[in-house]
Image (cartoon, grey):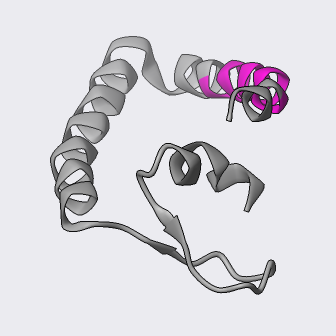
């Protein structure tokens, strides 16, 4: 569960089971509450950006961001 390493190492989630093919995590009640509060805020931010820049620019921004994430993601493993 390499992609989950930052949240499992920081104790925001706990891996379940030994099967490396499975992607099960255990979230605490506090974690679920954080997600419950954060999800609509994130959605609102995305909608505001979309309404500001329009569909074409939003697609471009998301493609650029995906490129940035793919470049920096390998370095996260060095810190966790």
Relative vertical location of residue 10 with respect to residue 56 in this rendering, above or below: below
Q: Residue at x 66, y 22 (%)?
A: 65
Q: Residue 64 versus residue 15: which sits nearer the camera?
A: 15
Q: Residue 70 versus residue 9: which sits nearer the camera?
A: 9
Instruction: Give the extent of the magenta segment.
Output: 62-74
- The image shows residue 33 at horizontal and vertical percentages of 16, 56
| Occupied quadrant, residue 50 | top left
| Occupied quadrant, residue 69 | top right
Report the predominant secondary structure element of the magenta stretch.
helix
In the displayed structure image, the side of residue 68 where residue 10 appears, left or right:
left
Q: Residue at x 59, y 42 (%)?
A: 6
- The image shows residue 11 at horizontal and vertical percentages of 45, 51
Is the N terminus in the top left, top right, bottom left or bottom right quadrant? Answer: bottom right
Q: Residue at x 80, y 81 (%)?
A: 21
Relative vertical location of residue 10 with respect to residue 29 in this rendering, above or below: above
- The image shows residue 39 at horizontal and vertical percentages of 27, 47
Is the C terminus in the top left, top right, bottom left or bottom right quadrant? Answer: top right
Relative vertical location of residue 20 with respect to residue 48 in this rendering, above or below: below
Q: Residue at x 55, y 54 (%)?
A: 8
In the displayed structure image, the side of residue 71 where residue 60 appears, left or right:
left
Q: How many marks?
A: 0
Q: Residue 78 versus residue 59: which sits nearer the camera?
A: 78
- The image shows residue 64 at horizontal and vertical percentages of 71, 18
Relative vertical location of residue 43 with respect to residue 49 in this rendering, above or below: below
Q: Residue 80 versus residue 55: which sits nearer the camera?
A: 80
In the displayed structure image, the side of residue 54 where residue 52 appears, left or right:
left
Q: Is residue 58 one of those drawn in magenta?
A: no
């Amino acid at each position: 569960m390499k992609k989950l390493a930052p949240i499992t190492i920081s104790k925001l989630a706990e891996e379940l089971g030994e099967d490396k093919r499975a992607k099960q995590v255990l979230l605490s009640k506090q974690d679920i509450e954080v997600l419950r509060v954060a999800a609509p805020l994130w959605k609102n931010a995305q909608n505001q950006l979309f309404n500001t820049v329009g569909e074409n620019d939003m697609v471009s921004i998301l493609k650029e961001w995906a490129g940035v994430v793919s470049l920096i993601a390998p370095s996260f493993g060095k810190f966790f």
